[in-house]
Image: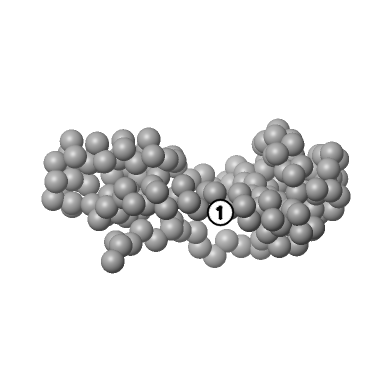
């Protein structure tokens, strides 16, 4: 167990060092742009430029730079899963035989379309996944027939979300 935790912490420290380097390249204007577009990904660059007091070309260049730096990793529409018949939202803590098996398990989770998030974690679980199912019966089929059959998975614990109270983007604040 300690070896797995050490692996996870080293991985997190490496990511953190890379993130700090990128953060040094993000200035006040970039943060202002991020704050605007994170609230409305469809806002025209012309309007962002007006709000920021710069040219549309400057906004385009800044956004492109942040895409290349992987500060911006996507944009688009949010889909209501319930409207499409996915009424059960669950979070599943997954314990693996060994933490190092996560790199083999992730591709297996990627084969299950209902799994929408997968995290390598510290704490009592090796991984945490978020899954949408049509109903509890469909969820049981996924859990018992797919997830618990993945090589290396030794146990799971499920939390069913009764209601999503809110969802928001991370805060984008200017650095001091």
Work out whether residue 120 can be spotted: yes
Q: Is residue 138 above or below residue 16?
A: above
Residue 139 locus on image (x, y percent): 77, 48
Determine the residue positioned at 57% across, 61% down. 164
Q: Residue at x 70, y 46 (%)?
A: 133
Q: Dividing the picture into quarters, in which one does residue 41 lie? A: top left
Residue in front for this viewpoint, 29 or 17:
17
Q: Foreground residue, 6 or 141?
A: 6
Q: Residue at x 68, y 59 (%)?
A: 122
Location of the C terminus (image quadrant): bottom left
Q: Which residue is mark 1?
A: 13
Tell me: 140 left or right of 73. Answer: right
Task: Between residue 112 and residue 87, name the one nearer to us.
Answer: 112
Q: Position of residue 98 (x, y in %)?
A: 80, 48
Question: Number of marks in the image?
Answer: 1
Disc 1 on helix, strand or loop?
helix
Horizontal side of residue 55 vs 35, given as left or right: left
Is residue 27 positioned above or below 150 on the image?
below
Label 1 neighbour load within 10 Å: few <14, some 14-19, many 20+: few
Q: Nearer the viewer, residue 88 or 150?
A: 150
| Position of residue 125 measured from the top left corner of the image (x, y, whole percent) | 74, 57
Q: Quadrant of the N terminus?
A: bottom right
The answer, for residue 132, to whether it is visible in the render is no
């Amino acid at each position: 167990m300690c070896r797995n935790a050490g692996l996870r912490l080293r991985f997190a420290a490496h990511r953190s060092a890379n993130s700090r380097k990128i953060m040094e390249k993000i200035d006040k204007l970039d943060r202002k742009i991020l704050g605007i577009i994170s609230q409305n990904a469809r806002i025209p660059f012309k309007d962002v430029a007006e709000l920021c007091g710069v040219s549309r070309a400057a906004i385009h260049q800044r956004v492109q730079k942040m895409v290349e730096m992987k500060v911006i990793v996507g944009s688009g529409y949010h889909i209501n899963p319930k409207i499409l018949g996915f009424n059960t939202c669950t979070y599943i803590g997954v314990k693996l035989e060994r933490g190092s098996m996560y790199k083999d398990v992730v591709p297996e989770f990627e084969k299950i379309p209902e799994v929408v998030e997968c995290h390598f974690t510290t704490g009592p679980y090796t991984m945490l996944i978020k899954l949408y199912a049509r109903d509890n019966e469909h969820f049981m089929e996924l859990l018992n027939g797919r997830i618990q059959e993945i090589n290396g998975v030794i146990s799971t614990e499920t939390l069913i979300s009764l209601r999503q109270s809110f969802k928001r983007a991370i805060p984008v604040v200017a650095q001091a």
